Image (spheres, rainbow, N blue to C red):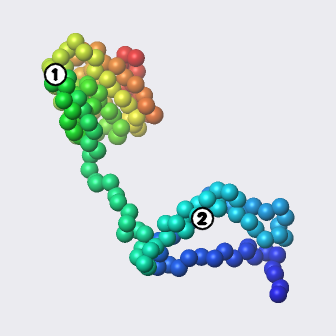
Amino acid sequence: MAVSLHSPPRIHEPSLSCATKLYSGLKFQSASPLIAAKPNATAEFYGKVNKSLQCRNHKPVRAQIKMMPIGTPRVPYRTPGEGTWQWVDLWNALYRERVIFIGQNIDEEFSNQILATMLYLDSVDDSKRLYFYINGPGGDLTPSLSIYDTMQSLKCPVGTHCVGYAYNLAGFLLAAGEK
């Protein structure tokens, strides 16, 4: 039997009726290019995992995968006065802790939401610090400057933290707050 030196060794592929995964980061290793390739330990492990997950009774594995529901994640939150736990959406929990997250381009609509939140939190309790977490590309000039003006006019102190990147006017807002 003739073996071509330029063709890679053929690997047994499972049937397409079952869900299969391709591990593109795994490579075959051998001591010599002329010796048949043997998978490394990581490839053997993932091969065993993939084999154990293959279909039973000719039903695809994909049908058994449970997905997380789409929507805003809900987190447990302890009510300060009562001490009881309740499930609230993530953004509501952050607002209750006086945290505002800027993670997108600042446009007119997003700026109005941020302004309303800032003004509301300042009216509720102006002695507690307001926290800005910034991870965004900046945005339009007028909406960003309206956020800056509101930050300067609030009675409560405003702390800013960069949690990724703050380009353009997001960096300006980052510098406008206290550390």
At x 64%, y 56%, the residue is 42
Q: Nearer the viewer, residue 61 or 100?
A: 61
In the rendering, at what x and y percent does residue 18 appear?
A: 47, 75
Q: Nearer the viewer, residue 109 or 97?
A: 97
For numbered disc 1, what is the local secondary structure? loop
Mark 2: give few (<14), some (14-19) or many (20+) Cα within 10 Å: some
Res. 114 in view: no
In the rendering, at what x and y percent does residue 97 appear?
A: 26, 26
Q: CA distance from mark 1 to mark 2?
A: 53 Å
Disc 2 marks a residue whose amino acid type is Gly
Say if mark 1 contacts mark 2, CB within 8 Å.
Answer: no
- Above or below residue 60? Residue 49 is above
Mark 1: give few (<14), some (14-19) or many (20+) Cα within 10 Å: few
Q: Nearer the viewer, residue 45 or 72?
A: 45
Disc 1 marks a residue whose amino acid type is Gly
At x 40%, y 17%, the residue is 179
Kindly indicate the quadrant of the structure image that contains residue 174.
top left
Kindly indicate the quadrant of the structure image that contains residue 22.
bottom right
Q: Quadrant of the N terminus?
A: bottom right
Q: Which mark is residue 47?
A: 2
At x 19%, y 29%, the residue is 84
Image check: 131 left or right of 14?
left
Point out the tag, 1 or 2, that comes first from the N-terminus: 2
Furthest toward the bottom, the residue is 1
- Above or below residue 38? Residue 179 is above
For numbered disc 2, what is the local secondary structure? helix
Return the residue at label 1: 81
In the rendering, at what x and y percent does residue 54 appear?
A: 49, 70
